[in-house]
Image (cartoon, grey):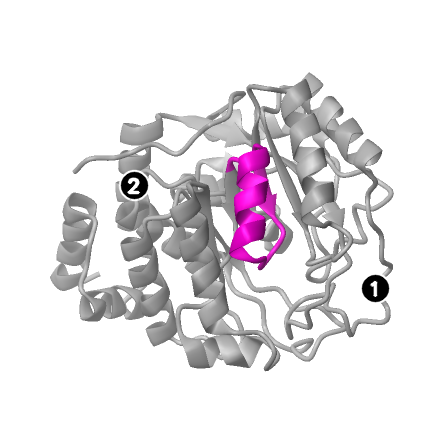
Amino acid sequence: MNQTVEGLIEKLAQEHTLETGELAILLKARDKQAAELLRQSADNVRQRVYGRQIYIRGLIEVSNICKNDCYYCGIRKSNGYCQRYRLTEEEILTCCQEGYDLGFRTFVLQGGEDGYFTDQRLCSLIEEIKKRYAHCAITLSLGERRRESYQRLFDAGADRYLLRHETATKAHYQRLHPPEMSYENRMDCLMALREIGYQVGCGFMVGSPGQTIDHLVADLKFIEAFQPDMCGIGPFISHRDTPFACQKAGTLEMTCYLLSIVRLLAPGVLLPSTTALGTIDPKGREQGILAGANVVMPNLSPSSVGKKYELYDNKLYTGQESAQHLEELKQRMEAIGYEIVTGRGDAKTYRI
C-alpha cells in the first residue's frame, strides 16, 4: 500500500467523501493492507455511531412470482423451472408472530413484483401487522410501484422501503435488465420513496456481469449523494436458469472492501451483511460485520418455501439462517466481538 492510498483512506475516514478519480485509485489499488486499513477505519466509524450492536431483521419472502425478466434473477418470469409460491396473509402473520416471540422488532416483507399484492391487500396486511405489533418497523422490498402506491403503503404504516438501484450507470442497467425496464424509472422510484418520507434503502451487486471500476465508482458517488438510510450490497451469484448462468460470482474480498467504503461515505447507514455473503463463504457474514456492516437478516419464511425463493444458486438456508436457530447466530456474532440486539434499529444521523 503506497502513501497515496493511505492518504485517501485517511481523507475518506475524516471527511466522508472522495472525488471520482480518488475512488477509482482506491478501488484499483486494493490489496490486503489497504483492505485492513479501510476495515479498521470503517469499524471505528461504525462503533462511534452504533457501538458493537448488530440489528436483526426478520425476513419474510412473501412470493417468488414476478412479472419482470431481469437477466440475473432466478425468479425471473421466463424461468419455467422455478417452483412458484405465494404466502397467504395468515401465513405472513404467523411468521411475524414467531419472529416477535424470538425478539424481532423489524419485519422485512420481500418478494417479486407479484400483481396479486395490490395496494388494498398490502395496506390491509400492513395495518394488521401494526395493530398487533405497534412498536415494530415494517420494511417493504417489493420492487417498482407507482408513486401513489408507495404513498398508500406509507400511510398504512410501512416505515422503510428497500429498492436496490442495481447500478448507477444507465448502459450497465440496460445490460442487466430487459428493454421494458427503465433505469430512469428505478431512479424515479427511489426519489419518490425519499420524498414520501420512507427510510429508504438502495444497493448493488458486486461483480455483476459487465461491471467495471467506473461503474463501481458511479455507485459509490450515488450512495454518497443519496445518503440512504439502508444500503444492500452483496456479491453477484449466478443462477443456472438465467442468461448469466456461466458468469463468475463476485468475491468476498471486494464485497467487504466496498462495505467498508460505504460505511465511511455514509456513516449512519444501516448496512446488512447479506445472505449472499454467507453463501459464498461459511464465515462470509462475520467478515461483512467486521468490514463495517451492522445488520443481519435471518429468514422467518416457512421452511416449505425457503428453497423456492432462489434468486441465485445454492442460496444459504441452513440452521443458522433459520430464525429457529437465532441463538447460534448470536453466538457467532459474539465470537467476533459483537452483540445482537432487539429493537427497531432505525438509521442514525451522523454529523462530521
Residue 174 as seen in the image, left or right of residue 197: right
Q: Residue at x 45, y 68 (%)?
A: 167
Q: Quadrant of residue 213?
A: bottom left
146 is within the stretch colored magenta: yes
- Amino acid under disc 1: Cys
Q: Residue at x 66, y 21 (%)?
A: 131
The percent position of residue 255, horizontal first and vertical second, equals 45, 57
The percent position of residue 325, horizontal first and vertical second, equals 72, 28
Q: Earlier in the sequence, mark 1 or mark 2?
A: 1
Pointer 1 residue: 82
The percent position of residue 158, horizontal first and vertical second, equals 56, 36
Q: Circle 1: is it few (<14), some (14-19), or many (20+) Cα within 10 Å? A: some
| Count of numbered circles on the image | 2
Pointer 2 residue: 267
Residue range highlighted in magenta: 139-159
The N terminus lies in which quarter of the figure? bottom left
Front residue of 321/332: it is 321
348 is within the stretch colored magenta: no
